[in-house]
Image (cartoon, rainbow, N blue to C red):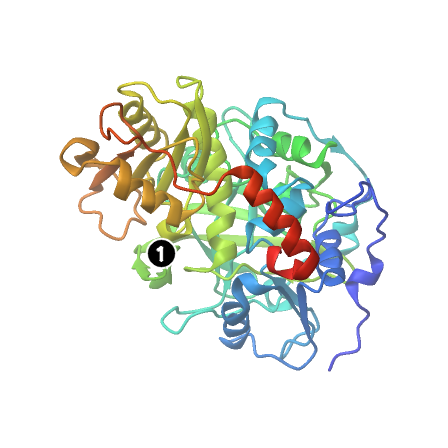
Amino acid sequence: MNDHPDPLENAAMTSRTAGAAMPRSESDQSCRGILQELDRRGRLLVISEEVDPIHDVSAILSIVDEKAAVRLDCIKGHDMPIFGNILSDLDRVALALDVAKSDIQEKLLSSIASPVPPVFVDDAPVQQQLFQDDVLTRLPVPTFFSKETGPYITAGLIVARDPETGLGNASYARIKVLGPNEAMIGIAPNHHLAIMARKAGAKGEPLPFAVVLGAHPAIQLAACFYLGLGDDEMHCAGSLLGEPVRLVRCKSIDLAVPAEAEIVLEGHIHIDEPILEGLVSEYHGMYEDYGSGVRVRFECMTCRSDAMLQVIEPGYHMEHLYLGAVPIAASLKAVIRRSVLNVGEVAVTASGSGRNNVVVQVDAPRPGQARRIMSICWGAVSIVKNITIVDSDVDPWDLDAVELAKMTRMRAERDILIVTDLPADRSEPQEDGGVIAKVGYDATMKAGDRSEGFDKALPPPDSYERMRQLLLRVKPEILI
């Protein structure tokens, strides 16, 4: 066992709202508040026995997955704890955003519509310590899977700035550790970060960037929005937090980062220095061979005096899926409702690896709207593959309800649309030459389909209410 103090004891917490919402002080823009609250609710697994960062950290996170968040206090060969699985289900996403689960999507949408600019501070917890050499060796970076060829930083929120426009950008990318100060970053060619790195490379310069680990979950979710190039995710994060994100200027580069994160790595992306990656895990749970990433070099690391390393279990694991699915769903709804005013909730399902499979709820859809929505989604986000349109009485996150709608409200010859040769993201497991066939399912009710109608066969509401009261008296736990 190690004997360093519990980092959560240093997180000053005061209750901001009553009920189920997470207590959060105005000074908490870290992960520590949600970790402390999950611990209070019995949803944080703390392990003090020594754990090997090579594969064993990954195995624990994989086994526990959506069941609980995890903090590992004793990592072999390192003094720094590791934590993960903090956003592995929708309840924890709601907790992080301080809303009911049913209000997650509207909270995210309002942050896009009403952004809050950040503010700058001079005194930042994330800069309590400064290291200028051997920065990556100081981190207990895990090796996750058997066919991957090295350790990966998987929870790195990337902050950069467009070298032409000066506009900021936040995103995610995997970073494979190569040495004490060097790593490989994997970026898809159409990624905003790749575009910015190519612009810098065209000037003969590397792109300054920062890797932020352990910022508040609301900031992490905002970084996953599908926004336009130049739209700053930190402004959306401020809206999600209900206050401006507090930023601090980096020590070695002209960028600003969340002041209350755990760790920040400062460096440059060298787009003209390719590095062969080898097999790497993807969100669909299999390996991909993307060929080469590019080299990055780090000049320094700043961190809290009692810093913890955040990790996200990659591949087909729930935190990796929801961190993509929830913001993608909100981004899609924002695009859809510009043209379709009666759109309801949008879900990006776990069965589609949190990326490929979309379900869109529509209230009293008019003829042609289902196919219009399919076209909008495919045009907005290339990673989207299958789309199902359902009525407003179907919960799009409930896959059993969605499948029932497909079985009872859809005729295959009329309501299934297959479009070939649409653009596919490079992570699509079946893409061929950058394209793939995509499928749309119109699982909405149509007039004239059933003479009996679509009413559900259920007991009357007053009988339900009487029997609920009876069960509350005799066996209340069955209603939980």
Question: Which sits in the foreground, 479 or 39?
Answer: 479
Residue 126: x and y in percent read 74, 51
Neighbour tally class for label 1: few under 14, some 14-19, many 20 plus, Cα within 10 Å: many
Looking at the figure, which quarter contains the N terminus?
A: bottom right
The structure residue drawn at horizontal position 46% and vertical position 28%, both measured from the top left corner, is 344
Residue 201: x and y in percent read 42, 38
**Residue 393 left/right relative to 46:** left
Residue 382 position by quadrant = top left
Tag 1: amino acid? His
Question: Which sits in the foreground, 398 or 168?
Answer: 398
Residue 306 position by quadrant = bottom right
Q: Is residue 324 above or below residue 420?
A: below
Camera sees residue 326: yes
Judging from the image, what secondary structure is the residue with disc 1 in? loop
Looking at the figure, which quarter contains the C terminus?
A: bottom right
The structure residue drawn at horizontal position 29% and vertical position 59%, both measured from the top left corner, is 289
The structure residue drawn at horizontal position 39% and vertical position 41%, both measured from the top left corner, is 457
- Across the whole image, how many numbered discs are drawn on residues? 1
Residue 391 position by quadrant = top left
The residue pinned by badge 1 equals 284
Q: Is residue 182 above or below residue 225?
A: below
**Residue 395 left/right relative to 274:** right
The structure residue drawn at horizontal position 80% and vertical position 40%, both measured from the top left corner, is 17
Residue 213: x and y in percent read 63, 53
Camera sees residue 214: no
Residue 122: x and y in percent read 81, 39
